[in-house]
Amino acid sequence: MTGSLRPSLRDPRQVMRLSRLGSLHQCRLSFMRILTRRMADEAWEFSRPIFNIAADGTGHAVYCAKGPDRTYSLVAFAHDLPSEMRSDRVIAEAWDATFTLFDGIPTADDIERLSKNVPLQEAGRIRESELSLSRANRSVRLWNHVVEVLASGHQPEAEQLANVGYLMRTTAVYGSGKFGAADREMIADRPEFSAPFQAEMLSVFLTRAFVRDLIEDAAQTKGGETAVRLDNRVARQLGIGNSTGLGMAPFIVNHPMLFNNWIMAREEALLRVRQVQRATDAEIAQFKEMLKRCSQSVSQWQSEHPLQVKKLNTLRADLDAVFSHVAKHDLSTDLPWDQLVRWSEAHLSEEGQELVNSVVMEPYDHLVDGLSNSLSDCNSDAFLIDGDMTVGALKELIQNCFGWALELDWTASENCAQAWYVSAEKLEPRIGSRFKESIAEYEQPLAPARDAVQAYEELRKWEHDKKISDFLLRHPEHRHTVRRSQISASAPYSEIQDNTIGEDILPIDMLRAKLSFFGATHFDPRSDRWVRICMFQGAPYPNELTHDNADHWVYPNLEGAE
Amino acid sequence: MSYSLNEVEAHSKRAARGAGLGWGLAEEAAKATRWLCAQNIDGCRVLTGVLEAHQDPACNLQTPISLVGEWLAEAGRLCPLHVGASLSDCATLVGSNGVRIRALSHPLFILPFVAAAARRAKTNLQVHWPGATMTTNGKTVDLATSTEAAFYIEQVEQVEIIVAPPLTKDANQIGRARPSNRDWEKLNSFAALTYAPATETSRRLGAGAGQSDND
């Protein structure tokens, strides 16, 4: 084996392209799987101390999750929402159900206070005793149908359920200090919240249990003694849907170190697996099983969006190619996973390549799972600028990170056609046409590549050995670029290596990159700017969670298997 | 009403940008405000003062002429945000030799940046102006000899930053901020300047038209 063929970390210029980020899939490091593994390992206990839902479907319920040191409670409010008010857009003002994750067990006074605020969502206030704020709407396609079927004593058809995938969709799950909630910094030192977004994932995990109880309750009210509960196997097929819009896109640009840590962990995991010299029979068998189960999940993945339809068709063809490749090629040779990854790079689409990258990690919990400890950003001082750095050194950082951008003509209208802004009406991030709308003066700093080029042009006028502190004294407008460039020195995957304001930008690529780390599946873009996903589909419900089912639930069980 | 520190930071960033500062400085103003609040200092009050001074031609806020020797403005007063950012940039220098600053507006606002310099230089720094002395190791601050009026003063003729002996005080950070309504609303009005007024096009396309979201 020659040195050049030895597996190495993938080049950020390959990994950080938008089309590839927009093709990422969940993996062992996904935040939902980290949560369920931990809860199973620590034998968390779950209870439902309050389920106070009236015949009209309104009321509240409390679901408790008890870990080794602390208990968390989902406080859920069910509402009677007229159908004309039901909207998944983040700008809606009323929902079918609203939620908060309470730090501890709420008293009656807490619930009374929350009942006056949580249903209002953004218009209400929560406190540091609350860790999240969220809401959900019913799937109109399924809810009434399932209530009817259960009320009449039958089970809904499993396939139809699996195709929609959920009974309710959340439209926002706010955490980390939003609307008065506790800051992440207040809970980050708790082991159960050390990985990112664990409180938010826990709230969704418990929300799913509530939704199941709520629909069974509605069926019971309607059908009385004739009504039946959802069969466990059918219920497993139901996750929680989520509609995600532009509000999430800036996150991965605004948190360069954190985003780097996510990508770096996944890349390091992939590298470790590619370095496996020989796979055992058990590891090969597990890979093949997960590949089959993964293909089952892909077959249930529906989208009507032309771009995703095309990607899905390619992905299905890719999967066929992988099956046939694996059937023909022995995986018990040297560096089997590295060989497979290299083959996939030559033969599959980015969707297919990234799927293979996720699935080859499956047999290697001992190589991969420990990396979940490196997903968070604990170094807030990476924000500080090193003013002693020379102009020459900074220029080199920009060349390394944004060399491609220095070649681009940023004055050409197609390269700066769009601008990100925040709308006065909804206070939400938006993207629009720089040349057709009056938004340029409100532009948000979400085009790091263009800004780096602007800073570079100015830096070229300075002598190489001048200090950056002197440069910034004269050019404070470049501080954000200097900061990002210095972060990139220690965080190679911190920057998207693509134009985020070009004519053909697809914000859904940015959304998918983030959502894939949550562990979302079945990405269903509804436009180039918002996407639907499914969370926890296939997962055990809280009281079913065991060591055996805590991890691979994301891959559907094959016919005949447990 | 109490706010989370993340709310303070997000609000402050938008306000600083709305007041006309670059995005990088706005981020730093926001982190500084958050740091002050975490020390139980009214960061929103200080930031509001800084941003109002920025709008006031009579204040004539400036950046230092040079980072060598005393830090001076050519005319008018030094802006504590620009000065603060440079203090943090020059942590090595400040952490070994200290620095003297002349004619500084809202001096309290440089404290978080001095703290950042202390962390980067791994030392303790003392900030002093008449009536106010504060020492920081970067994570916590000792305000022992400061009076409220001197502490929140709008401008001083001279500020001295020197290397100080270690702090004996333990870190006592708090997780919430309780700004006055007046300051919060003032920051809100600055922040509002960063929002693009809605148009028919933005309503239709800004968040992405597409298929029904209610099925």
Image: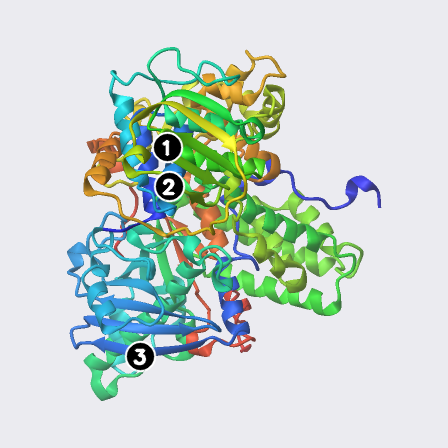
Q: Secondary structure at mark 3?
A: strand
Q: Chain of mark 1?
A: B
Question: Do callouts 3 and 1 point to residues on the same chain?
Answer: no
Disc marking residue A326: none
Q: Would you place residue B82 above or below residue B188 in this image?
A: above
Are discs 1 and 2 less than 8 Å apart at CB? yes
Mark 3 crowd level (few <14, some 14–19, many ≥20, 10 Å Cα): few
Q: Position of residue A378 (x, y in %)?
A: 52, 49
Give the quarter of the image for residue A400.
top right
Type of amino acid at the residue the image marks with label 3: Pro
**Horizontal side of residue B120 vs A218, given as left or right:** right
Query: Between marks 3 and 2, how big is the CA–CA gap?
Result: 41 Å
**Horizontal side of residue A12 vs A60, given as left or right:** right
Name the residue at 64% across, 55% down. Answer: A322
Q: Position of residue A468 (x, y in %)?
A: 55, 22
**Horizontal side of residue A500 vs A468, given as left or right:** left
Q: Chain of mark 3?
A: A
Asked whether B175 or A103 is in front, the reply is B175
Whether residue A422 is visible, yes or no, is no
Q: Which residue is mark 1?
A: B109
Type of amino acid at the residue the image marks with label 2: Leu
Disc marking residue A49: 3
In the rendered image, which quarter contains the C terminus of chain B?
Answer: bottom left
Are discs 3 and 2 less than 8 Å apart at CB? no
Q: Which residue is mark 2?
A: B36
Type of amino acid at the residue the image marks with label 1: Phe
